[in-house]
Amino acid sequence: MSGAKDPGSPGGAAAGRDVPAIELVGATKRFRTPSGGLHTAVRDLHLTVRQGEFVAVVGPTGCGKSTTLTLVSGLEEPSEGEVRVQGGPVAGIGTQVGFVFQQDAVFPWRTVLSNVTAGPRFRGVPAAEARERARDWLARVGLAAFEDRYPHQLSGGMRKRVALAQTLVNDPRILLMDEPFSALDVQTRALVSDQLLELWSGTGASVVFVTHDLEEAIALADRVVVMTAGPATVKQVFDIDLPRPRTVEAVRLEPRFIETYREIWASLGEEVRITRERGAGSAA
Amino acid sequence: MPLETAPAAAPVRDTSAAARTEARERAARHRRIGVHAARAAVLAGVLGLWEAAARTGVVDPFNFSMPSRIWDQIWQWVAHGTAQGSLGEQIGYTLYEALLGWVVGVVAGVVLGIALGRIRFLADVLGPYVKVLNAIPRIVLAPIFLIWFGLGPASKVASAVVLVFFPVFFNAFQGAREVDRNLVANARILGARNRQVTLQVVVPAATSWIFTSLHVSFGFALIGAIVGEYIGATKGLGLLVAAAQGTFNAAGVYAAMTILAVVALLTEGLLTLAERKLFRWKPADAGDGR
Ligand SMILES: Nc1ncnc2c1ncn2[C@@H]1O[C@H](COP(=O)(O)OP(=O)(O)OP(=O)(O)O)[C@@H](O)[C@H]1O
Ligand SMILES: [Mg+2]
């Protein structure tokens, strides 16, 4: 585990911003299907995320976005190609990575506070200090008053914020987020997105944010990566030159935003169409 | 129509709503009382019929006994003790054997179930043996245990253990296998080592599976202890049954059965209480069992 970090950190610390936070070099991932065949989820993927950069990934459903994140996190190994984090190859789960999952993954038998202390406690931080850090993060995501509740007693939006605090309390240098807000209503989503931008701006962490919502992608990110229909590979990368700090509701109305949206949708829409036609074909 | 009633409606509706709530509560209360009364009536009816049938000779009281005799028998045991000693001592013996067997069986079942559920290699190696052992009708082991361990409590504990072990084992195994993969992935990303994943994710996630088996398995532990005592013992409720049967005392058999049922129900109630305490994190509808 620390082996993945050590070779990278001398270079990473000295070279600072020069070493990319994440590099995927020709990464390919194949899964064995129940029928015995091989299913390629990600094919020959090249992607670089710079230090402190916020990258949003959009692509049609089932194309391989989640799989890409599991490769970066070390939960899965690539079948071919290489994945590097902070300059060092990924071997096992790194200590610098945070991952907010697509599905609810807070521990239902732990209270809110205990959920947020889990990470530091797993890593050997003394209980009192872990609690202090957890309370600090709960206050930042606006859940200080709910620390004694169990997850099933919270709303969906609150649970997502617990997941966010649970991840951020470990102070990850790399933050992977898999459609973290897709289960939320539009208003809550805008609110939590703004909260995320605010929290992120203080940390200097590099973010990969997977979403189906192109507006959300543009409003949050420095760059938007469009993936092809599965097996996923990078189709096109768009730079978003909207000024920061941003608020999601305001940035949405800028002419530049609408222009960018149209441009990216032209690229993404085609892949979505391909995926849909394929689905209709295989269903028939 | 809403326009017409609107000005006067508010206060009127308030009182009528309150009245309706009260009426609904009253109806619910009446229903509950009705259910309890009907239950008592069913019991009284069955016992009464039995008693009447036995007294009038429709059924043979020598073979089938009757409620009043059973009651006399229980009362006699309570007041004057049994041939083997006081009734409390017999209950204590059986409970002791059942509890000990249950605890040993549960601990072994949980530990092995989780270990095999987590460690693929172990599951592959030991899986077939567990299946074969499970296929043996375990109640026939009781005579063997009597030969091995003698008339004392050890042989009863052993039969309770083998009866308890398997259901608990399979539930723990299944629970460990079916842990939400996202929870495990999340824990590992957060920094958990294998042991922490097992103890802090797999075990809590499997507890509801395990608890389902605890209810059933305490019943099995009692069965194991009783059957063991029935076959050969110096003390216990099973011996009471055997002794009553040996003297053609049908009332004695029924009386021992009644006592057993009460003991089983009480321990079941205690387990339910413990479960409620342990599963505070679950949504209310599952915990309250309404
Ligand atoms: N463990 C697995 N075993 C077999 N196939 C898998 C596995 N995980 C993912 N796949 C397949 O890989 C493909 C990509 O899955 P992935 O979850 O990465 O898609 P996604 O882009 O995140 O989709 P969505 O936007 O709907 O979340 C899918 O076709 C899926 O069926
Ligand atoms: Mg996904």
Image (cartoon, coloured by chain):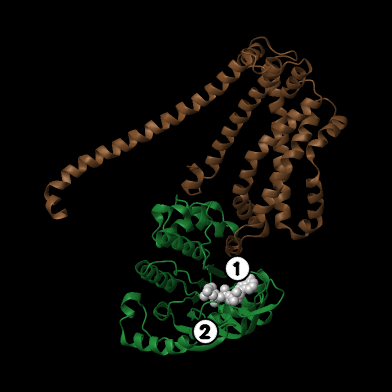
Chain colours: A green, B brown
From this view, report whether residue A6 is shown above or below residue A128: below
Q: Is mark 2 within 8 Å of ligand 1?
A: no
User: Looking at numbered disc 1 in the image, what kind of residue is underneath it?
Assistant: Thr
Measured in 3D between alpha carbons, the distance from the residue under mark 1 to the one under mark 2, in whole angstroms, is 41 Å
Helix, strand or loop at label 1? It is loop
Question: Where in the image, quadrant-wise, is ligand 1 located?
Answer: bottom right
* Residue B54 location, quadrant: top right
Which one is in front, A122 or B195? B195
User: Looking at numbered disc 2 in the image, what kind of residue is underneath it?
Assistant: Glu
Q: Residue furthest top?
A: B80
Q: Mark 2 belongs to which subunit? A: A
**Crowdedness near tag 1: few (<14), some (14–19) or many (≥20) residues, C-alpha within 10 Å:** many
- Residue A72 visible in this rendered orientation of the protein: no
Which one is in front, A280 or A99? A280
Helix, strand or loop at label 2? It is helix
Task: Please name the residue that numbered disc 1 is placed on.
Answer: A95
